[in-house]
Amino acid sequence: MATFDELQTLLLNRAFPAFGLSRTTGQTYQPATLIGSDQTLWAPFNTIPTAAPIFAPSGSAFFSAYSDVITALLPGRGQLDPINVAKRKLADWGSKPPTWSINYATMQSLLAAAPKTGFSFNNPAPPTSGFWGLWASSPPADGITSLLAAESLDMTVSFANLLNFAPTPSDWYLSSALANAYSNPGRAPWDPTSSITWDTTFGPGGTLARMTASLIIVDALEISYTSQALYTPERQIAILAHVQGGLWPYYLDHSGATTSISFDASGRLTVTITTAAGQPVALAAAVLSASAYLGLS
């Protein structure tokens, strides 16, 4: 009997290749996130995510962590030394909030020109943890969700447009300075008197151990699935009570999507989820190690 974690893993095993993401670097949004401004578009890139398969902030902001590291490094001789250049760029940027190279309006143009895609699947694979169940924040092991995973299920997913969105930081950032620091653990440009070290920056629990490299943004999402599980009238009522908060797989609430459900005479569940054209939605992110993000591995 499949568990819901196995069902969720199967979904990601099909979705990530369709998105152009690797299962080792891709992280799914839970819930999917509406993108409506420069701020909501850039926020994930200013987030240092955890190592979980679900995209979640670690509590460290990329701009702040990067600024702290560059400020603490020792500059070399010459105006073209990358640490010197990075320090000047930060000084010139000042206290402005960080931006990235592509804004919301340009992203919309890129998304409109992106290809149509989709995928489908029909049940099980191997478990992970931390995923929600049938509705937002529900446990994956409760009776309703377990029943969904235990029976066969057919799903189709399509997007009018799918964009792998990968901007670069604006003029406050210098990749070569960070790469220089990464490539020289325990020696210059690291300051031996500083509490900011290679380990506190790039080590397993470091402030820059991982970076967000890209987002998967879609337009006009359409999802439909039917489960062969038989839901009692009581369980049907419980599911209906949570529809507006968003249902699996992307948990888009009433303001972000139209979700409709129906049950046949035997209690089989059919779910249809759609989003409006022109309303971008982020579904997943590519999260890279520091070395991969800096092009060093």
Image: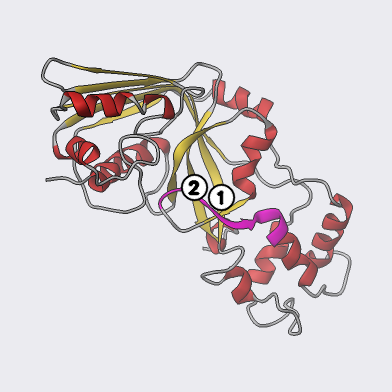
Going from N to C along the chain, the mark reached first, 1 or 2, is: 1
Q: Magenta part of the protein: which range?
A: 53-65
Q: Position of residue 17 (x, y in %)?
A: 36, 40
Q: Position of residue 69 (x, y in %)?
A: 72, 67
Q: Secondary structure at mark 1?
A: strand
Callout 1 amino acid: Thr
The answer to whether one can see residue 130 in this image is yes
The answer to whether one can see residue 103 in this image is no
Q: Who's the residue at 68% across and 70% down the image?
A: 181
Q: Secondary structure at mark 2?
A: strand
Q: Who's the residue at 49% across and 16% down the image?
A: 276
Q: Is 57 left or right of 105, judged from the image as shown?
A: left
Count of numbered tags: 2
- Tag 2 residue: 286
Residue 13 lies in the magenta stretch: no
Q: CA distance from mark 1 to mark 2?
A: 6 Å
Residue neighbourhood size for the residue with mark 2, other residues' Cα within 10 Å, grouped as few (<14), some (14–19), many (≥20): many
Could you say which quadrant of the image residue 270 lies in?
A: top left
- Tag 1 residue: 212
The quadrant of the rendering that contains the N terminus is top left
Callout 2 amino acid: Ala
**Between 266 and 68, the one nearer to me in the picture:** 266
